[in-house]
Amino acid sequence: MNFVLDAQEKSLLEQIKTKLPEIGNDRSKLIPVLQLIQAKLAYLPAEAIHVVAAHLDISPSEVYGVATFYNQFRFHPPGKNAVKVCLGTACHVKGGDIILENFERKLEIKEGETTADREFSVDRVACVGCCALAPVIVVGETVHGHMQPSKVEGLVLRARIEKEKQEREKQQK
Amino acid sequence: MPKLVIDDREIDVAARTKVIEAAAQLGIWIPRFCYHPALGSVGACRVCAVKFIQGPVKGVQMSCMIDAQDNMVVSTTDEEAVDFRRHVIEWLMLNHPHDCPVCDEGGHCLLQDMTVAGGHGLRRYLGKKRTYTDQYLGPLLQHEMNRCIHCYRCSRFYQEFSGFRDLGVMRSANQTYFGRYENGVLESPFSGNLSDICPTGVYTDKPSRFFGRRWDYQRCPSICINCSLGCHTVASIKYREVKRQEARFSEAVNGYFICDRGRYGFFYAGLEERSRQAMVDGKEVPFDQAVKVLKEKIEEIGRGQGSEAIACVGSARNSIETQAMLQHVCQLKGWANPSYLMDRAITKKVKSAISRLEPELVVSLRQVEAADFIMVFGADPINEAPMLALAMRQARRDGAEIAVLDPRPISLPFRFTHLPVVLDDLSLYASALIKTAVGRDAVKELGQNATEFYDVIPDVAGNSYPVKEQISNLGEKLRSSQRPLIVCGTEIVRETTPQLAADLALFLRAAKGQAGLFYLMPGANAFGAGLFSRVEDSFEKTVEDIENGAVKALVLIENNPFWQFPNRLRLKQALDQLDLIVVFDYVNSVAAQKAHVFFPTTTLFESGGVFINQEGRAQAVPQALTGGIPIAQTGGGDHPPRVYGLGISGFEARTAWQILAELADLELHSEEKLRSKVWNWMIETIPGFAALPPIGELPDDGIRIELGAQPSARFSMEGITKGEDLAEKFELIPVEWTFGTEELSAHCECLRDLAGKPCIFMCRSDAEDLNLTDGDQLSIELDRGIIEAKLRAENDMASGTLVIPRHKDLDWQKMDNGRALVPKGRIKKIT
Ligand code: SF4
Ligand code: SF4
Ligand code: FES
Ligand code: FES
């Protein structure tokens, strides 16, 4: 999915562009440049891939090829509710994959992706250190233990209702 | 020379031969996916495992990764190795979608063969399969990533071998993806090779999609006639239609690959608008009647004006048989001497290139790869002869230095030095370059003439070239090279440049003991056309003869001057003056529509023939099909024909030489006899053909026509005069593009979108001087009309030059000859 950059991201990217000449345009600068962008934007949007390709005079496929080789780069913006589903040994045994699948289905995205409204992102992680509560997920900073499909439903619904409420309040003001 | 034993048989191989190749030399075919002789080994697929029983390595190992060594004993049939390979196939098949029934690769799929042969018949894995999203890659290839087995052949070919970067590997581990960053047309003009080298159905041929399995096709070796290199192909025919072409290995010419112009440039052969019936005054008539009418008409003109008033024009796409028969018939009938090439300049250039291809200098396309310093004089490889660019890239990968002297904006898939010089200065710079690297003493052995010539040609010191420094740097490198090569174009260069290129090659050879010379020519059989043409004959002269009334009847044999004659209006007026226009052709051209008498001829697929490529290699093409209208057309779709009759519809076409023979009343007892008769006549009368074997006995890689060295042609001083001073004028040169300018491939629907938009190139600094910017719509006023197109300003081209691709959608034919001079004031921006 291609996300439209918001105003802040756009200006950050513009800032980065002005910095690029200092870094130089040798091919070996590819990873440092990608890291810089990710540090500022938290992910590598499609626009950034093209910016980097133009700067280093290589094809976008090469930039993307290198970026996707490493686990450290993200291609989707983090969601407001960043869901991390644990698939460590204990959680896996307790059906963590079912939880993940529930999120994927409910949110209509795949793991590693973000919903179009940027409300949710879903990632898998390995053991968050509270195996006794398996299966476990972490949303933002909050740990949710003993997950069940019905809880997934509840979580997503709660977040959406919360959002609607906020929006209503904003309008009333 | 390591000596080893494979499957109980001993073999000696060259050092550094991989075991997989050593086995192949014994006729043992070890399974492989990632290994390819042109791409080398990477050890990615693990399916070439064999057991090393004795010697320096032991156990199950990859035969593509290990060099053959002394004392090795290898078994390809060892139980452990066979079991290993079976498991490899099984894991490669884990994620495979099992969609063979709807996959176009099925039937010639390496993965399918290996799966069956390897003994993995039943799926045990019941888990989820990984899936990918496919991409749109343009009109030539279909992408189906789920079938991928991650052998890396595609990215290695695309990036390493051919030097294009927009397709490659992305992601890692279980998600590894082969494709582009986003949907889009592949940029490489060699992309079609992906369908040949991918061992499974990830890239399949798009125009022939869902038309048939390999075994449904009649497959026949052929060669490409879309440029002068003559690459080898395999034509696949089904339902009376050429449907697909693949690359065919040739040791001497193209190696394993071909370009996309060649691969997809055959659709002219099956076009619906192709005329299949003889015609008189626009009405279809039986063949014999057309012959009768034509004979009468010709006789009548002969009686009135003399037989000299009948002029025949062949072309560079005629087979040798047609060219020879034309010559023969014109002599027999006392018609004017035939011409074959478009204008005087090109005839002269082609003829001098032919005569200067001395046996010690000439190299084949494959040998280009071995050069360590390549100088290109007035040629644009990727646009004029794409496979040359691929061969040059291989040389470059081996460290060769490459310098291109050409006014055009040249783009090549590797690093090279471009000296954008105007055509008039090309010989100056070329000489200076050679002179920096070759000392006067070295050329003494070539005789008095050579030293005199050496003294006259300019060197760097005497002139203040803007690129002086580049020339001396290059000269420095040229001096230390051992296998230098000169590539010389014949299309846009001055008449004397091919001569000079040969002289300079001789200098290099004298200095280094070895040097190559490689010309490009305007057409698949331009070499033959040049051999048969007299220096004074060209279509240009024929037009003059029409204008002055000497010629009253014109016979065009597989030639459409409207495609390339630089002055369209003049051509039209000349043709209007004629009493009789006769066209023999297999494309429905503008000329064909003007014909009073038209004869359909056969394509090379339908008749075969011999073509001589630019290095003088005579190559035979066998007949691949008997002709007739494709069933898809007679039946309306793929339905069997709805109208029944005797014979095959559209079967009237004959070879051009057969029709000529009929006109001359040559005995037509059998086609074969007649063919060998012309052939023998040709061998006897044309010098250079003497070495040819009887017809039908040309070896697969052809035979090089050797004309021998002609010392008298060497070192003529005419080549080194400096050209006219163009001062305030631009020289406008019409040029070729990979797609969209060559006549046969321009008829192919699938290549249509690959040709760029019509445009005019101009050096950026010139554009700025004239207050023009990239993208402006320009009008260029010539003496014969106005050319309009978008401006493309380029940094890297000669100042003072305008370059116009002869794009089929651009009305460019408004010049007196192959170039025009344009005063600055005549270039305007249209607002
Ligand atoms: S796409 Fe084909 S050639 Fe490329 S890695 Fe996959 S199987 Fe190999
Ligand atoms: S390089 Fe020329 S001869 Fe070879 S395939 Fe391409 S067009 Fe045909
Ligand atoms: S495995 Fe999930 S918290 Fe340890
Ligand atoms: S062919 Fe040897 S590992 Fe693939």
Image: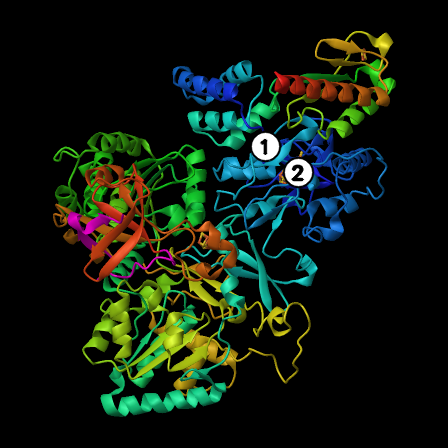
Which quarter shows the C terminus of chain A? Answer: top right
In the drawing, does residue B383 fall left or right of residue B80?
A: left
- In the rendered image, the residue lying farthest to the front is A172
State the mark number for residue B133: 2
Residue B808 among those drawn in magenta: yes
At label 2, the amino acid type is Thr
Q: Which residue is mark 1?
A: B169
Q: Is residue A143 visible?
A: yes
Count neighbours of disc 2 (C-alpha within 10 A) and say few if under 14, some if 14 to 19, many if 20 or more: few
Q: On the rendered structure, is B800 left or right of B113? A: left
| Mark 1 CB lies closer than 8 A to ligand 1 | yes
Tell me the CA gap for discs 2 and 1. Answer: 14 Å
For the magenta stretch, what is the residue range? B807-831
Is the stretch drawn in magenta largely helix, strand or loop? loop
Indicate the secondary structure of the residue bearing disc 2.
loop
Q: Quadrant of residue B202?
A: top right
Task: Label 1, secondary structure: give it.
Answer: strand
